[in-house]
Amino acid sequence: MDTGTPAPRRRMRADARRNYERLLAEAAAAFGEHGADFSLEEIARRAGVANGTLYGHFPTRRALLEALMGDRMRTLAATGEELLAHPSPFDGLAAWARAAMAHTTLYRGLGATLMQAVEDETSELHTACKAVLAAGEGLVARARAAGEARPDVTAPDLYALVNAAAWAGEQSSALQAERLLAFGLDGFRAHPPSADDHIPGQR
Amino acid sequence: MDTGTPAPRRRMRADARRNYERLLAEAAAAFGEHGADFSLEEIARRAGVANGTLYGHFPTRRALLEALMGDRMRTLAATGEELLAHPSPFDGLAAWARAAMAHTTLYRGLGATLMQAVEDETSELHTACKAVLAAGEGLVARARAAGEARPDVTAPDLYALVNAAAWAGEQSSALQAERLLAFGLDGFRAHPPSADDHIPGQR
DNA sequence: ACCTGAACACCGTTCAAGT
DNA sequence: ACCTGAACACCGTTCAAGT
């Protein structure tokens, strides 16, 4: 389960702390209902603070998202490590992929931010995304080693699949997201001995 | 090859026609360089017309995109019908999927519009998207009938895969888009006799 | 140390007034 | 028939001035 609102790193003045938490609460509600691109100005308005106050606490939209999502993402990474103990390497990988997609689905439009953050070191979400990617890498490596996943499947492939499927789901339906994820995962699976379709670009 | 700027449906006054074409040309350039979400106001500015003139010709951004993409999309649909004659049903499907993804990639951010338009009957792109979807349906049906594609793969699955892979490519790299498409297509492939992974939701 | 609110430079869309 | 440009209601971001 979740630990609720994450604590700011350091001691803050009482009024500052109160503003910080109200902003976080309003942002969570607004992002949940209208997506991660919702107006920051309107969030400040709903929290009853001036827009400058929001920027004081969260200099960028990504910083706000990190405050909302950081803990969840670290939990997801931890779940990945636990799934390394799953009896079936591929099923463990698949289960984790579904959990990861559920995280991306938290706020509509989040996938793009998560995709960019993993490559952008200046993003406040970079560290959390890297942890998620590393967890995926562990699971992919294990499935590859067991001969259950293709030898050319990478962690970035898994990361991209999860976010892309979530994106597709936002455009049409949650069912479509699940289907795309399932087909993609099946494409990751090692064939018994048969046809080797070429995946471009090995990395 | 392409027929160049599409003609407006009816006779127009000479100055109107000139504005129409300048708007289209500037939009093509701007969307190509900065994506399909580029400022319409700036496009009007570059075309040397008032913003109201742009809205007069193209009441919505989708109308502008339809004028730019409609012919291309109908060509893509026609290519799909030709590929029904491909010796290998699955290879024909795969070749068409790659061509479709190339279309989505024309303007950054286009995928979302194409995904929505296929379900939104009020979208100016709806008809063109439906034609593309129908072409996909033909190829998928043939590959299913030949036992080369899973029996539960649908045209919307193919459509979603193409756009989702294109989207992922925009967030990271064109190579990632190709890889995701390849893995997804491989997931569409029928297994010889073996493991049946469950794809949710049959449609 | 933190907050306020105005300032700046943008958007998309509509519509009265012109020619 | 078509064009213009202002009007309206929004944005994100910055920063001087306050307490």
Image (cartoon, coloured by chain):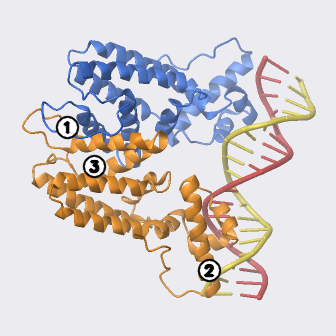
Chain colours: A orange, B blue, C yellow, D red
Q: Mark 3 lies on which chain?
A: A
Residue type, numbered disc 1: Asp
Instruction: Give the residue number, with chain letter if any, for mark 2.
Output: A18
Instruction: Give the residue number, with chain letter if any, for mark 3.
Output: A157
Residue type, numbered disc 2: Arg
Q: Position of residue A188 (x, y in %)?
A: 21, 44
Task: Work out whether residue B109 can be spotted.
Answer: no
Q: Position of residue A192 (x, y in %)?
A: 9, 39
Q: Mark 1 lies on which chain?
A: B
How would you rate the neighbour count of disc 2 (Cα within 10 Å): few for under 14, some for 14-19, many for 20 or more? few
Could you tell me how many numbered marks the image carries?
3
Residue drawn at x 40%, y 39% is A176
Q: Where is residue A202 in the image (x, y as percent from the top left)?
A: 19, 46
* C-alpha span from label 2 to label 3: 41 Å
* C-alpha span from label 2 to label 1: 54 Å
Q: Is mark 3 on a helix, strand or loop?
A: helix
Question: Left or right: where does residue D8 sit relative to residue B17?
Answer: right
Instruction: Give the residue number, with chain letter if any, for mark 1.
Output: B196
Question: Left or right: where does residue A183 sit relative to residue A174?
Answer: left
Residue type, numbered disc 3: Asp
Residue drawn at x 56%, y 26% is B66
Q: Earlier in the sequence, mark 2 or mark 3?
A: 2
Q: Which chain carries label 2?
A: A
Residue drawn at x 59%, y 81% is A17
Of tags 2 and 3, the one toward the viewer is 2
Q: Position of residue A95 (x, y in %)?
A: 27, 54
